Image (cartoon, helix red, strand yellow):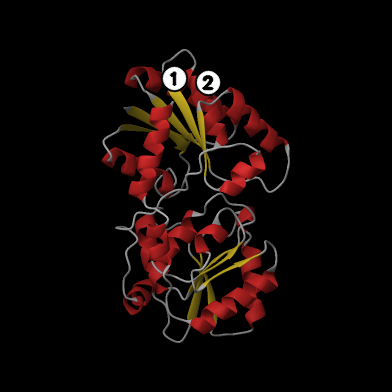
């Protein structure tokens, strides 16, 4: 089976998102012939140009499946495969916190344009009001392996007399709500606690930050199945998060993980205080294995979807 992966290719580090590349490699390891097609540039002109470029690749590669990540790339894939034998599979990566035009537009595409659609959490399927396969992105447990915290702290340059709350995104991304993280940490009124944004780092370097941190804080307003949370859990890092995507499902019952309502910075601060007071690490890695959220398990689920279409 030959599969073309389509995704935005504008990341400053690595071009495509790290989770797209990780899933791409996991499918290749399962024996599929994989081709990566990054959509370069932003705006409708870039996506319109990508249709013709992708059409040539689909025909030259005689692709069986075109798997697009993000809904706009799904439309590019559909237009590029018209008249070909290729089937279109689309991964919807976020959720829909508001009932708006985008929600109706995605429903239309699922019903009329795409051969199969994957969502990352049951919450997104419920928002769409459709029975869809729920397949979160997997974690590469070999890549996100546990290292001693003291060793990781030295590698990150962390000071010995500080406790570090890492926040893993670009603060300029409005939907990630860095201001909520700032306010939650300020509410602790503890000068020994440092809020440390981690972004524009190679994906391979993230493991040392998860192993070094006292807590990983996620304050997004909307997510599907946040990869950063699962990667932190794979390193047994305590997690405090807003209630987005599948966070509550994955963390339920894992000591050292705390979930707060979106926008409730006092509840986030309380979660941080509890995590810091508890100290130590969590059993997050066991949960990732228990739920089968590894790259190998997820790759096999995706292959089942490819075969169904």
Q: Judge by depth and name the residue closer to the eye, 17 or 133.
A: 133
Kindly identify the residue that appears in the image at 38 percent across and 76 percent down.
153
Kindly identify the residue that appears in the image at 41 percent across and 16 percent down.
85
Kindly identify the residue that appears in the image at 49 percent across and 60 percent down.
229
Q: Judge by depth and name the residue closer to the eye, 152 or 127.
A: 127
Q: Position of residue 69 (x, y in %)?
A: 49, 37
Pointer 1 or 2: first along the chain = 1
Check contact, mark 1 vs mark 2: CB within 8 A.
Answer: yes
- The answer to which image quadrant residue 100 occupies is top right
- The residue that mark 1 highlights is 55
Mark 2 lies on a secondary structure that is helix
13 up-or-down from 196: above or below? above
- The answer to which image quadrant residue 45 occupies is top right
Quadrant of the rendering where the C terminus is positioned: top left
Q: Judge by depth and name the residue closer to the eye, 196 or 78.
A: 78
Q: Position of residue 91 (x, y in %)?
A: 50, 38
- The residue that mark 2 highlights is 79
168 up-or-down from 67: above or below? below
Mark 1 lies on a secondary structure that is helix
Q: 84 left or right of 225?
A: left
How many C-alpha atoms fall within 10 Å of the one at disc 2: few (<14), some, or many (≥20)? some
Kindly identify the residue that appears in the image at 38 percent across and 66 percent down.
235
The answer to whether any part of residue 56 appears in the image is yes
Q: Position of residue 11 (x, y in %)?
A: 46, 46
The answer to whether any part of residue 170 appears in the image is no
Q: 134 left or right of 243?
A: left
Q: Position of residue 165 (x, y in %)?
A: 52, 73
How many C-alpha atoms fall within 10 Å of the one at disc 1: few (<14), some, or many (≥20)? some
Q: 106 left or right of 211?
A: right
203 up-or-down from 164: above or below? above
Quadrant of the rendering where the N terminus is positioned: top left
Which residue, as the protein is rendered here, is positioned at the far top?
A: 83
């Amino acid at each position: 089976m030959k599969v073309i992966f389509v995704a935005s290719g504008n990341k400053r580090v690595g071009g495509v998102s790290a989770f797209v590349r990780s899933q791409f490699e996991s499918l290749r390891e399962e024996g599929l012939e994989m081709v990566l097609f990054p959509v370069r540039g932003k705006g409708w002109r870039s996506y319109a140009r990508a249709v013709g470029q992708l059409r040539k690749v689909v025909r030259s590669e005689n692709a069986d499946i075109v798997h697009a990540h993000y809904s706009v790339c799904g439309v590019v894939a559909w237009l590029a495969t018209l008249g070909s034998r290729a089937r279109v599979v689309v991964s919807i990566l976020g959720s829909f916190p508001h009932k708006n035009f985008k929600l109706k537009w995605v429903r239309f595409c699922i019903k009329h344009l795409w051969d199969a659609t994957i969502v990352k959490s049951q919450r997104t399927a419920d928002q769409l009001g459709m029975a869809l396969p729920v397949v979160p992105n997997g974690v590469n447990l070999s890549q996100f392996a546990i290292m001693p915290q003291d060793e990781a702290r030295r590698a990150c340059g962390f000071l010995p007399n500080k406790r570090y709350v890492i926040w893993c995104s670009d603060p300029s991304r409005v939907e990630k709500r860095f201001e909520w993280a700032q306010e939650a940490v300020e509410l602790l009124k503890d000068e020994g606690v440092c809020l440390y944004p981690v972004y524009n780092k190679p994906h391979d370097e993230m493991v040392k930050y998860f192993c070094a941190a006292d807590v990983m804080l996620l304050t997004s307003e909307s997510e599907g199945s946040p990869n950063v949370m699962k990667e932190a859990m794979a390193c047994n890092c305590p997690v405090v998060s807003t209630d987005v995507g599948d966070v509550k499902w994955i963390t339920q019952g894992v000591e050292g993980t705390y979930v707060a309502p979106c926008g409730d910075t006092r509840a986030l601060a309380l979660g941080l205080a509890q995590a810091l007071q508890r100290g130590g690490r969590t059993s997050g890695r066991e949960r990732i294995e228990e739920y089968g959220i590894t790259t190998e398990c997820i790759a096999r689920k995706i292959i089942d979807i490819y075969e169904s279409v």
